[in-house]
Amino acid sequence: MSVSTTIDSTLGVVSTVDPAGTTAAGTVTVSGLKAATTTVSSTPVTLVAGSAGLVLLSTSGAATVTMPDPSTCPGSTFVFRSTTAQAHVLTASLNAKQFTAGLLAPYQSSSHRLTFAATAGNSVAMLSDGNSFLVIGTSGSFTWT
């Protein structure tokens, strides 16, 4: 008897036990995904690969956050959200131009520093491709240098 498992956008996880299409319910464990949230409440902070996921910037002053080396976390997504009206700053780990525009053509092609506008609710999503962090989405205003 063979078992194959697929993830369907409507049905979720579906395991097929035999070629006739009989399905079986069970528990599936997926490791390596981060569900927890990191809250930055003091500054400066240097993130590590394990910090991937949602990062809340909630300092009373502007937070300075250094990203991990993108080669240590290929495929990881970091989503930053400002919960305070501060000009938070994200910097590249090696002070090299490790932030690239990805799908967002209006931004410059690469930078090593991203500064949030001093408005609560700004957010940016970045995906590591192993060489740099691709900016895959933003909400709000940012300065790239």
Image (cartoon, helix red, strand yellow):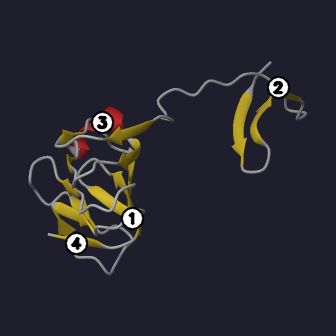
Badge nearest the viewer, 1 or 3? 1
Residue 77's spot in the image, x, y percent?
Answer: 40, 48
Q: Mark 2 — residue?
A: 25
What amino acid is at disc 4? Thr
**Between marks 2 and 1, how big is the CA–CA gap?**
41 Å
Q: Nearer the viewer, residue 71 or 49?
A: 49
Q: CA distance from mark 2 to mark 4?
A: 49 Å
Q: Quadrant of the N terminus?
A: top right
Q: Residues under labels 3 and 4: Cα distance?
A: 24 Å
Pick whichever of labels 1 and 3 is earlier in the sequence: 3
Lower position in the chain sequence, tag 2 or tag 1: 2
In the displayed structure image, the side of residue 22 where residue 44 appears, left or right: left
Q: Quadrant of residue 24?
A: top right
SS under mark 2: loop
Q: Secondary structure at mark 3?
A: helix
Q: Secondary structure at mark 1?
A: loop
Q: Which residue is mark 3?
A: 49
Q: Residue at x 71, y 33 (%)?
A: 5
Q: Which residue is mark 1?
A: 122
Q: Residue at x 90, y 30 (%)?
A: 22
Can you identify the residue that label 4 sits on? 143
